[in-house]
Amino acid sequence: MLLSIEVPDVDVVLPRVATLGGAAPHGSNDMPWGQRVVHVTGPDGNAVNLTQQL
């Protein structure tokens, strides 16, 4: 299972991931279906997608 959370602006939220104990191994990407997405892991290792409608 992969949890996706919609946020107003992926690039604004992304820097907070590390300060909250998570990691984002790759930067955000624009997807062809109209979303900006970044894959992150939380402090406990669970994967989460942060998404933004473009």
Image (cartoon, rainbow, N blue to C red):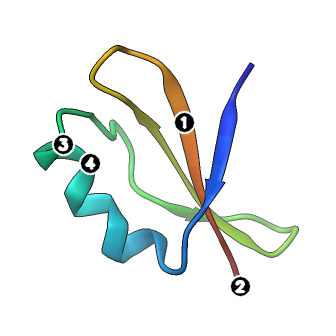
- Residue on which disc 1 sits: 48
Position in image of residue 8 (x %, y %): 54, 80
Ranked by sequence position, the earlier of labels 3 and 1 is 3
In the rendered view, does 47 fall on the left or right side of 27? right
Which residue is painted at 33% across and 14% down in the image? 44
CA gap, disc 4 and disc 3:
5 Å
Circle 2/circle 3 CB separation < 8 Å: no
Q: How many neighbours does mark 4 have within 10 angstroms: few (below 14), some (14-19), or many (20 or more)?
A: some
Ranked by sequence position, the earlier of labels 2 and 3 is 3
Q: Residue furthest left?
A: 19
In the displayed structure, 8 sits above or below 30; it is: below
CA gap, disc 3 and disc 1:
14 Å
Q: How many neighbours does mark 3 have within 10 angstroms: few (below 14), some (14-19), or many (20 or more)?
A: few
Ranked by sequence position, the earlier of labels 4 and 2 is 4
Ranked by sequence position, the earlier of labels 1 and 2 is 1
In the rendered view, does 47 fall on the left or right side of 51? left
CA gap, disc 1 and disc 2:
19 Å
Q: Which mark is residue 20?
A: 3
**Occupied quadrant, residue 41:** top left
Check disc 2 and report its element: helix, strand or loop. loop
- Tell me which amino acid carries mark 4: Val
In the displayed structure, 40 sits above or below 44; it is: below
In the displayed structure, 8 sits above or below 24; it is: below
- Residue on which disc 2 sits: 54
